Amino acid sequence: MNNHQRIIILIFFFSLIIGLSVSSNASITTVITISVEADSYVDSDDPTSNFGEEDYIKVSKFEGINNTNTTKTGLIRFSLTELQDIDIDSVFLELYVLMLTVRHRIGVYKSSDVSWNELTVTHNTRPSYNETVLDTELVGPDWEWYSWSVTEAVNDSVETGQITFVIKVEKIYKSTDWVWFFSKDSELKEGYSPRLYVNYTESKASSGPNYLIILISLFPLLLKKQQRNKGE
């Protein structure tokens, strides 16, 4: 084997190594929209009634008789099984306002209780919740989407497979002002029920040109040309 052949073989193997190593991981941002599993609201003025089949989720807070606060509180539950084994970037709870009397500051809270039944839950049997607000949003006007950041709460609940959100008015009003959000049972406007909007990062291997095939096909030609040059 002469020097020219050695050089060709060295070039071939060096290029082969480069070709095998030319690959990268491409990060792709993907979106999942998760539909609500169950929703309802409870009313402190009507503590034994259930509202799980209503077209709306009504929330309010105002001063009642003898300075007692009257509240209507929303309950929303989601299944998180779709989010297992993925790298979550952000999660937003999205609610669509059907009607409201005035602009309201709405707070979202997390409950670890996912056992409630939307067709039986009442104010007296409502789930307890963590009183640290996850996020607040000033809601108004109506007929629009509004969103609350709930990333950390969802991440903490993925392993259990479900999460409950409690929806409350943050300010006490002097009158019976309220907000109505579309529920999953609304037939008025399908596709506007509560949902989770999830962004996550998906890694996919991507390769450059297939240098291995190119080099294997060219190698005999290089040797043949080198031998022909030697004969000349």
Image (tube, rainbow, N blue to C red):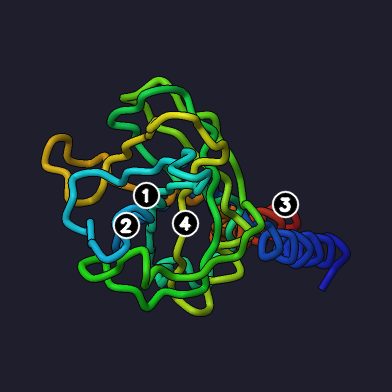
**Mark 3, other Cα within 10 Å: few <14 / some 14–19 / many ≥20:** few
Left or right side of 158 for 18 = right
At 83% from the left and 67% from the top, the residue drawn is 6
Q: Which residue is mark 4?
A: 166
In this rendering, the answer to whether 26 lies above or below 155 is above
Q: Which residue is mark 1?
A: 195
Q: CA distance from mark 4 to mark 3?
A: 82 Å
Q: CA distance from mark 3 to mark 1?
A: 72 Å
Q: Which mark is residue 160?
A: none
N-terminal label among 2 and 3? 2
Q: Which residue is mark 3?
A: 229
Q: Position of residue 85 (x, y in %)?
A: 53, 73
Instruction: Select label 4 or label 3 by which is in front.
Output: 4
Q: CA distance from mark 2 to mark 4?
A: 13 Å
N-terminal label among 3 and 1? 1
SS assignment at label 1: strand
**Label 1 close to label 2 by CB (< 8 Å):** yes
N-terminal label among 2 and 4? 2
SS assignment at label 4: strand
SS assignment at label 2: loop
